Amino acid sequence: MGVSRVATAEDSRFGGERRASGPRGLLDRIRATPAGRLTLRIVIGVIGTALVITGLIMVPFPGPGWLVVFAGLAVLATEFTWASRLLEFAKDKVRAATDWLKRQNWFVRIVASALTLLCAGAIVWVSVRLTLGVDLIQEARELLS
């Protein structure tokens, strides 16, 4: 003989299936009330916006600036449709630029890489010069001579 289970109100609300625990189930429970929905949207909005702003500040410097911007948009896209559309638009543009670069010959790729490295080096040089007052080029000349 098997053990039978009595159906509960929770079973009828969720189509007879038990809800999965975990982050998705937790978010669904939070969204179940108007106050929870509003609170979740505010928290997601603040976290996502902070990530986007932090990423945009990091963009001129070598490192994961654009990755942080995309992560912030992904966080915002969990609650806001405009962020989801913007994220898809940005991914399409990055994909198109990457595909274009892949179709170019080796000379164009080398020039693009050199320009990218030159821009990153100039940003580091200006940043160190303005923040620390150290001229890296002058220091390198003195070190080499």
Image (cartoon, rainbow, N blue to C red):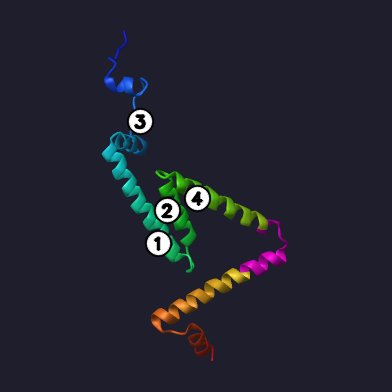
Task: Identify which residue is drawn at 48% across, 68% down.
Answer: 60
Type of amino acid at the residue the image marks with label 2: Gly
> In the rendered image, which residue does mark 2 sit on?
72
Residue 133 spot, x, y in % from top left: 41, 84
Type of amino acid at the residue the image marks with label 4: Leu
Q: Earlier in the sequence, mark 3 or mark 1?
A: 3
The residue stretch that appears in magenta = 101-113
> In the rendered image, which residue does mark 4 sit on?
86
**Quarter holding the C terminus?**
bottom right
Image quarter for residue 98? bottom right
Q: Nearer the viewer, mark 2 or mark 3?
A: 2
Q: Furthest-top residue in view?
A: 1
> In the rendered image, which residue does mark 1 sit on?
54
CA neighbours of label 3 inside 10 A, class few (<14), some (14 to 19), many (20+): few
Mark 4 → mark 1, Cα distance in angstroms: 18 Å
Q: Which of marks 2 and 4 is nearer the N terminus?
A: 2
* Label of residue 20 in the image: 3
CA neighbours of label 1 inside 10 A, class few (<14), some (14 to 19), many (20+): some
Q: Earlier in the sequence, mark 1 or mark 2?
A: 1
Contact between labelled residues 2 and 1, with CB atoms less than 8 Å apart: yes
Element carrying mark 2: helix
